[in-house]
Amino acid sequence: RTVSRDGDTSAANAAVTRTIAASATEAWEVNRVVCSYSATTGTGTLEISFGGTVYFSQYINGGGVFVLPFQEGFNPSGIRNEALEVTLSAGGIGITGKLDVFYA
């Protein structure tokens, strides 16, 4: 399958979310997530959900680039017909977040 990449940047002190619309014929798999903040912050969270249910949630360090690779692709139980959402939490006052989601 072809891997697609979608990228987003948040407004200052706002979460950034990438939503991939539900598909009746595709079971979306996350291959890799790359995210960062524009400045050092305490910690943030990165969440991956399908159909509004969170299946992955981790704290991330606000300094530097965070790369999360999934060797086999991430989709618990081959979920179909549900939107895929990846969210990077707000970084704090004056801080923007960048989020790239690679999926197939």
Image (cartoon, grey):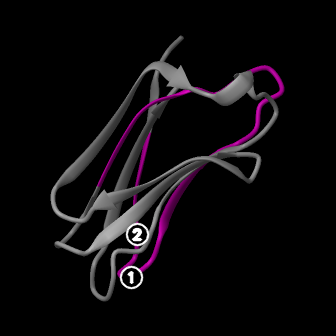
Judge left or right: residue 61 versus residue 68. left
Residue at the image point whose x is 43% and y is 62% from the top: 45
Mark 1 surroundings within 10 Å by alpha-carbon count, few (fewer than 14), some (14 through 19), many (20 or more): some
Q: Above or below — where is 37 with respect to 55? A: below
Which residue has dot 2 on it?
A: 10
Give the x, y percent position of residue 40. 17, 72
Mark 2 surroundings within 10 Å by alpha-carbon count, few (fewer than 14), some (14 through 19), many (20 or more): some
Element assignment for label 2? loop
Please identify the quarter of the rendering in which residue 21 is found.
Answer: top right
| Count of number-bearing discs | 2
Kind of residue indicated by mark 2: Ser
Looking at the image, can residue 11 be seen? Answer: yes
Judge left or right: residue 68 versus residue 6. left
Between the residue at mark 1 and the residue at mark 2, the CA separation in whole angstroms equals 8 Å
Mark 1–mark 2 CB contact (< 8 Å): no
Looking at the image, can residue 104 be seen? Answer: no
Please identify the quarter of the rendering in which residue 50 is found.
Answer: top right
Residue at the image point whose x is 53% and y is 59% from the top: 17
Please identify the quarter of the rendering in which residue 78 is found.
Answer: top right
Give the x, y percent position of residue 56. 55, 45
Kind of residue indicated by mark 1: Asn
Which residue has dot 1 on it?
A: 13
Residue at the image point whose x is 77% and y is 31% from the top: 23
Residue at the image point whose x is 72% and y is 43% from the top: 83
Q: What span is colored magenta in the figure? A: 6-35
Q: Per the image, is 20 magenta?
A: yes
Give the x, y percent position of residue 94. 27, 86
Give the x, y percent position of residue 63. 17, 63
Q: Nearer the viewer, mark 1 or mark 2?
A: 1
